[in-house]
Image: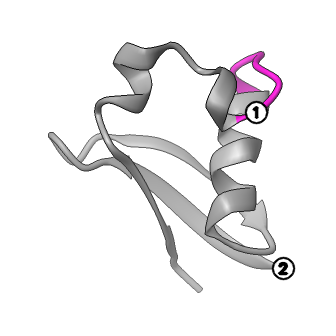
Amino acid sequence: MSIFEIRQKTNGAVLWTGSASDETSALDAMARAAGYVDFASLPADIRETCPVARSID
């Protein structure tokens, strides 16, 4: 597992930081932490901010 940071591509705001096995898993973990099933379940306006997962370790 690696530590990932997810930022909004549109403004650089940090949305989530935590451990995951890859970028896709990190996006899903962020969504679960917000109460959603996975990234695809997030409202469109959140997904449209273009969240980007990046390993920080």
- Residue 18 lies in quadrant: bottom right
The residue type indicated by label 1 comes to Asp
Marks 1 and 2 sit apart, C-alpha to C-alpha, by 18 Å
Q: Is residue 18 left or right of residue 21?
A: left
Quadrant in the picture for the C terminus: bottom right
Please tell me which residue lies in front, 18 or 37. Answer: 37
Q: Magenta stretch: give its range.
A: 33-38
Q: Do we see residue 18 in this rendering? A: no
Vertically, is 34 above or below 4? Answer: above
Element type where label 1 sits in the image: loop
Q: Position of residue 31 (x, y in %)?
A: 68, 31
Q: Nearer the viewer, mark 1 or mark 2?
A: 1
Residue position for label 1: 38
Q: Position of residue 14 (x, y in %)?
A: 39, 44
Q: Is residue 34 left or right of residue 32?
A: left
Quadrant in the picture for the N terminus: bottom right
| 36 in magenta | yes
Q: Residue drawn at (29%, 33%), measured in percent from left and top?
A: 49
Q: Do we see residue 46 in this rendering? A: yes
Which circle's residue, 1 or 2, is located before the other in the chain? 2
Task: Identify the disc placed on residue 23.
Answer: none
The residue type indicated by label 2 comes to Met
Q: Residue drawn at (67%, 60%), measured in percent from left and top?
A: 24
Residue pushed farthest left? Answer: 11
Vertically, is 27 above or below 20? Answer: above
Q: Residues within 10 Å of mark 1 (few under 14, many from 20)?
A: some
Residue position for label 2: 1
Please tell me which residue lies in front, 40 or 26. Answer: 40
